[in-house]
Amino acid sequence: MQPKALSSLLIAVISTLALVACSCNAQTPNAGLADVHTDVQYTQNSPAQFMDLYVPQGVAAALPAIVAIHGGGWRGGSRTGYRNAASHFVSHGYVFCTIDYRLDDTAIYPAQIEDCKCAIRYLRAHANLYHIDPSRIGVWGESAGGHLAAMLGTSAGVKRLEGTGGWEDQSSAVQAVLDLYGPSDLRAYGKTTAVSQAGADIVVKFLGGTPMDKPDLAADASPIVFVSKNSAPFLILQGDKDPLVSVAQSQELYDTLKASGVDATIKILPGAGHGGPQFFAPEIISMVDDFFARELKPAGQ
């Protein structure tokens, strides 16, 4: 694929992801639902390392948190544009957080997962300030964000991926992962017959080289490599017509999680591509709500 065509495809993908993020709840956000904290800097290594938090008003007890990680091929996207999703989750009793991270035009992997892990550690270090229960943090990501969410769910305790952003006395582990069509095995992108060329080109930029040239880095960037019995519960959503991330990527991650004894569910959406309206159909939103409630809320809460 030529660079111009790849750029156009990536722009289209980012636009679709923004639509998905903004369409989680169609109603206009009610500012009275939440105390909003914008431009919170979770570390000081880069101007990209900020988050926004939405905290239900009148909180009497610590609440579970859901952290959204944007997509965009690790090269684009933003934490903004999630206000409708924030309204939805705040109304369901969660602290909702959206994060930015260094993109691959300024830093190649593992900078992105280091930032995500630092953001989780920051939330735990400041749990009292934002009324968060530090033992109940879930993550949600789509595409590149789904990849990073899956990395958080599988690589807890892998010191070389933690980075040096601060809050090292806190854990970066998460307790639930919603992975929307995130790539799970970047090693496969060295075999262009098994994946789309467009997807392979994006991965090369992310790694700063091909998976064949950088096999150790490609492995370190693959959530499937880190799956163990201690991985977080997963809900994986994937379209069977995805032109960038093949169904095999999600299916193999699901199979590996199940083989390791991890609570995992996969839903393959017929006819869905890389994002699109199928991912915020009412039955899918209900599935997402049920998943986070089951994993992050005590019985009866």
Image: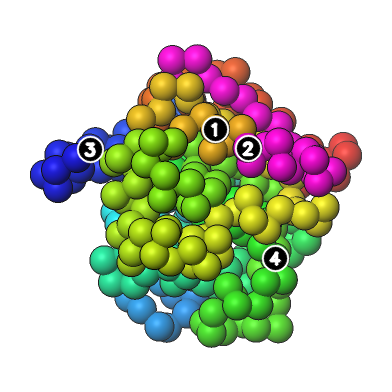
Q: Please indicate whether residue 248 sits to the left or right of residue 126 in the image.
A: left
Q: Where is residue 75 drawn, in percent x and y? A: 30, 57
Q: Residues within 10 Å of mark 4 (few under 14, many from 20)?
A: many
Secondary element under disc 4, as helix, strand or loop, is: loop
Amino acid type shown at disc 3: Leu
Q: Where is residue 197 drawn, in percent x and y? A: 30, 40
Q: Nearer the viewer, residue 200 or 35?
A: 200
Q: Find out whether the residues at labels 2 and 1 contact each other: C-beta distance under 8 Å.
A: yes
Amino acid type shown at disc 1: Ala
Q: Nearer the viewer, residue 212 or 197?
A: 212
Q: Which mark is residue 9?
A: 3
In reply to whether residue 261 is colored magenta, the answer given is yes
Give the residue at mark 2. Answer: 252
Q: Name which residue lies at 33% across and 64% down.
A: 209
Examine the rendered structure and indicate whether residue 250 appears above or below residue 173: above
Q: CA distance from mark 2 to mark 4?
A: 20 Å
Q: CA distance from mark 3 to mark 1?
A: 21 Å
Examine the rendered structure and indicate whether residue 126 appears above or below residue 231: below
Q: Nearer the viewer, mark 1 or mark 4?
A: 1
Give the residue at mark 4. Answer: 156
Q: Name which residue lies at 54% across and 79% down.
A: 163
Question: Quadrant where the C terminus lies?
Answer: top right
